[in-house]
Amino acid sequence: MYIVVAGGGMVGGSLIKKLLDNKHDVVLIEQNKDLCEKMYAETGVITIHGSASQLEILKDAKIQKADVFIAATASDTDNLAATIMAKSFNIPNIIIRMRDINYENAYKVAGADTIVAVTELMVNRMIFEVEKPMVQKITTIGSGKADIFRIVVPENGKTAGKSIADISSTDKFPNECRFLAVYNKDNDELTISRGDHVLKEKDELFLIAGADDITTAAEYLLQ
């Protein structure tokens, strides 16, 4: 894919390296000239010195042919302006790095397809390490339409020993909640969910659902 990334700092730079490793065509737009030179020297990525909120800079990056635009600067105001500009080129997929949750609605109105709340992810991870909760929200997708959650099957839980198919077919389990994967820490084994997979105590379940459905699912799975 042809991907334009705005911001080559810690987040954007790491992302670009991964994208290049995965054989994508990547162009970096970065306002810091020294960082442009550093990224080019380290990765060979095409770099454009300037702001992604400027029309001519976006044209230099050939934004009109991009499959994906990623705004990954450290400034929400810059990312928002870049989103508005990128949307005017009808980019199929616009992904945003959001630092301040107060910008979420503005990003949605501007046309962002995916909003990654970096600060929220960090805080949630730290809270998880402190409290080790049985239910943890991993991330939000689809501009807030659904969440991915992690739920741990409790010891002596009623769902241990049941298959995913049996759980999904019960009236008490929400129809719009789907199992994605199951991780067994004891065996260090990650399994993509199948209907015949039988849950064990302390299995870590990864599910996708709306917020209301995940509450219902958690109540059932944590019995």
Image: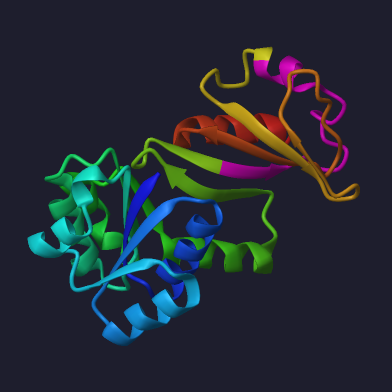
Q: Residue at x 19, y 64 (%)?
A: 52
Q: Is residue 170 visible?
A: no
- Residue at the farthest bottom position: 34
- Say how many tags the image has: 0
Instruction: Please tell me which residue lies in front, 25 or 216.
Output: 25
35 with respect to 86 (left or right): right
* 123, above or below 185, in the image: below
Instruction: Please tell me which residue lies in front, 122 or 49.
Output: 49
- Residue at the farthest left position: 55
Q: Residue at x 17, y 46 (%)?
A: 87
Position of residue 24 measured from the top left corner of the image (x, y, whole percent): 45, 50
Screen quadrant of the C terminus: top right
Q: Is residue 129 visible?
A: yes
Q: Residue at x 26, y 47 (%)?
A: 112
Position of residue 89 measured from the top left corner of the image (x, y, whole percent): 15, 44
Instruction: Please tell me which residue lies in front, 88 or 162.
Output: 88
Colouring used for the render: rainbow
Screen quadrant of the N terminus: top left
Position of residue 73 measured from the top left corner of the image (x, y, whole percent): 31, 69
Magenta stretch holds residue 85 = no
* 86, above or below 14, in the image: above
Start-end of magenta stretch? 149-168
Magenta stretch holds residue 164 = yes
State the image quarter where residue 190 is shown: top right
Position of residue 67 measured from the top left corner of the image (x, y, whole percent): 32, 42
